[in-house]
Amino acid sequence: MPESPYLVIDPERVRANYRTLDAAVTVGTRIRYAVKAAPVAELITLLAAEGAEFDVASIGEIDQCLGLGVAPERLCYGNPIKKSAHIARAFALGVRRYAFDTEDDLDRIAEFAPGSEVECRFLSSAPQSRTPFGTKFGCAPAEALRLLVRARDLGLEVGGPYFHVGSQQLDPAAWRIGIEQAGEIVKALADKNIAVGAVNVGGGLPISYADAAPELDAIAAAISGAAAEFLPAATGLIVEPGRALVGNAGTVHAEVVGVRFAPDGRRWVYLDIGRYNGMAETENEYIAYRFVTDRDGDPVSEAVVAGPTCDGDDVLYQRTKVLLPTTLRAGDRIQILHTGAYTASYSSVSFNGFPPLTVHVSGAERE
Ligand SMILES: Cc1ncc(COP(=O)(O)O)c(C=O)c1O
């Protein structure tokens, strides 16, 4: 057994998630995997074989997908923040789909990736998700309309409007709000004789952690229902999940490094994994992971859970109520469930000398 911490991802669970989503969405909906969630070669190859497209955020992710034999036509350079040199490089590599949210980015796509298809990301009025983007991305809907007209005038292919309701979005109504707004844009474009290829309804599809999330079926039903209500019949759909495809397929295997009672009496449990080697999404305690220990069944009490570095911010949970066995001690193994998304991919530097989280692809992971 390798030394912990490490992440084990079950590829068959990822395949099952893809098929569940594919069966739940309207026929013809394109599924585009957001590689950033878990840029693991085996998963990219598997999803490519299932028919997925790929949302890539950088030249690094483009190179990785192409290196695995994914055709460039199946990639969308979906990050609205990109250098001109990277647009040119992506274009030279064959990428012909780009997302943007500013006129400047659009103009540079027209210059460095001429004739490509573009999707304009607008800021939808959807309610906040668990790990929100805030206002970092997306123009106003009226601006999206103006920019997509401009895209046509610049000789680009109009892909369509695009929104992302924020990651780990627990409210299915969020997609309804976004699709209604996208529908207004699509209809206004049609009035100008600009046909939209597809509306990209983004990612954000949630999974269950300590708290249960709506099932994929419920989200897919909300998307399909809103599409039928607000979009012209021929409009295609793209869904761009990361977390929902890989999150529940991964388990982090970790170890208790020590247990301490602070002067205020609170019990601290220190793990060999923390904020900087995989548990980045515990920032602001946004994501409440579930823990499984070898001592489950013993009496439990509240614990602060912290990572192994000397950084004061390397604390996973101190406000969230985490109950762990009172018998837990140094050397005990601990599993952190549903950690397939946004764990290893965040953990890429050896802060404090702790190596990035390693990934093993195998086996059936725990529900
Ligand atoms: C552009 C883009 N698309 C899709 C996703 C996937 O989101 P999620 O993992 O919430 O499905 C992200 C996540 O950050 C993103 O930035």
Image: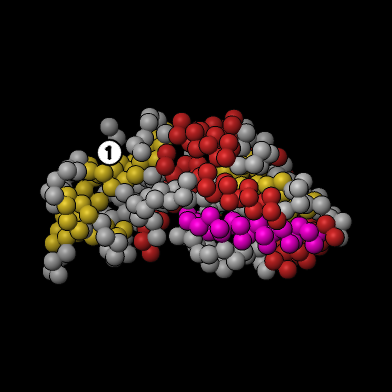
Q: Secondary structure at mark 1?
A: loop
x 25%, y 56%: residue = 322
x 61%, y 57%: residue = 176
Q: Position of residue 258 (x, y in %)?
A: 17, 52
Q: How many marks?
A: 1
Q: Is residue 329 visible?
A: no
Residue 31 placement: quadrant? top right
Quadrant where the C terminus sits is top left
x 39%, y 56%: residue = 287
Q: Position of residue 77 (x, y in %)?
A: 65, 50
Q: 329 or 187: which is nearer to us?
A: 187
x 34%, y 44%: residue = 337
Q: Is residue 72 above or below residue 144?
A: above
Q: Which segment did they paint magenta?
A: 163-189
Instruction: Look at label 1 and name its amino acid.
Output: Glu
Q: 70 or 125: which is nearer to us?
A: 125
Q: Position of residue 190 (x, y in %)?
A: 83, 57
Indicate left or right for 190 with 303 as reference.
Answer: right
